[in-house]
Amino acid sequence: MADIESVATLLARSDPRISDQLELLADMGQDFAAAMDIEATLARALERITQYMSAAGGALFMLDPSGETLTCQACVGATDITGLTLKKDQGIVGRCVQNNVGEIVRDVSKDPNWANQVDKQTGFTTKSILCAPLSVRDKRIGAIEMVNKLSVDGLFTDADLHMLQALTSSAALAILNARMATALVEQERVRRELELAAEIQRSLLPETPAVGFPVYGVNVPARTVSGDFYDFFSLPDGRIFFNLADVSGKGMNAALLMAKTASLFHCLGKTLHQPGRLLAQINAEICETVTRGMFVTMLAGIYDVKAGVVRLANAGHEPPLLHRPDGTFEAFPAESPPLGIMPMPIDDESFPEIEVRLDGGTLYVFTDGLTA
């Protein structure tokens, strides 16, 4: 460390400009390392670079995610071109990004890639340009462009180019680090959201029934959380009220809609023992607050264990299958749309109901996750 410091000190003594360069690089490095707002930090950095380069103006161009266009994100000088969009290979800045090489154009009028539309619109006269790419290895993200050196001859030097390349390398690394940090924050947010949604879902599922109980449910999410849920509980007269549902969408919105639908079923089902009317009531409640485009497919039923009869209402869900003792299957397709689609009740405030006699068979109710 002492050797590095001594070399830097000797260089600074031999050329005071090197001391300024090292100071600028160190200051910008600290700014980028501590940056909470990378866009504001880059704007400040561009202003300092433009001042250090003694340029009449400067601009920072960024490639869009598709890599097809360059947009001016910040600029310094008499002409404000913030928001200006160019094709990825348009102009000198486009050429610089495509070739991933910094360059000096001492007379833009002689450059075949010079696009003078901005000068025509603003009245500004561009004479010379210094441009360096914002890149880390082969990862190109944009470029910084300096315009018109404020000197006697008005020309940028090779030393200017080397310095700008050093500065753009630091800026590019800071931008990529900021993007990675943003992506990690977003991943963590999504992870926590999914964990909370999974916790909500687990809390909605009924406890595992005792051995021999005639109704049994299984929920196995393919990932952290699914949009499927079920519930069942015994009524005072011994019948069993049950449901199976699938909420459209993913994430917290789906989990919240799932929680609301499950709560409505469990609460209203304690006193409203007609599956069709119950679904109509739940549908009316959901339609009042459901997020646009979301819905719930749901099957509700009451199983009379003594009579061996199941009374069903199906709102857009997969057809349940009756597996008869002789090995044959019978499906019972839905006769109503999913909940949350139509705000008005159906058929005199009740969804259609059907009666299924088990006669020793087994009724299977499932979601599309099983058949997919």
Image (cartoon, rainbow, N blue to C red):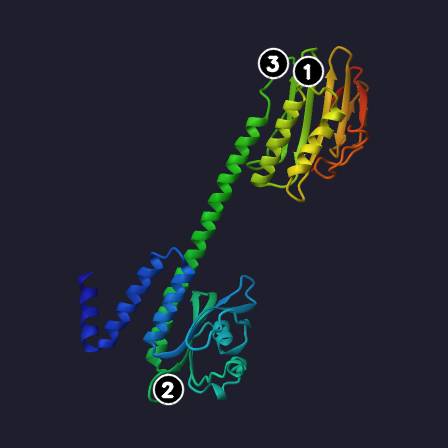
Q: Is residue 105 above or below residue 172?
A: below
State how far apart marks 3 and 2 are (Cα).
Answer: 89 Å
**Spot occupied by residue 371 in the image (x, y as percentages of width and height):** 71, 35
The residue tagged with tag 1: helix, strand or loop?
loop
State how far apart marks 2 and 1 are (Cα).
Answer: 90 Å
Q: Which residue is mark 3?
A: 210
Residue type highlighted by circle 1: Pro
Q: Residues within 10 Å of mark 3 (few under 14, many from 20)?
A: few
**Residue 359 is drawn in which quadrant?**
top right
Residue type highlighted by circle 2: Gly
Q: Is residue 102 left or right of residue 8?
A: right
> Is residue 159 at all visible to an observer of this figure?
yes
The residue tagged with tag 2: helix, strand or loop?
loop
Q: Residues within 10 Å of mark 1 (few under 14, many from 20)?
A: few
Disc on the earlier residue, 2 or 1: 2
Q: Is residue 215 above or below residue 98?
A: above
**Spot occupied by residue 267 in the image (x, y as percentages of width and height):** 63, 23
Residue type highlighted by circle 3: Ala
Q: Which residue occupies 81% across, 21% down?
A: 355
Q: Which residue is mark 2?
A: 154
State how far apart marks 1 and 3 are (Cα).
Answer: 9 Å
* Quarter that holds the C terminus: top right
Q: Which residue is mark 1?
A: 214
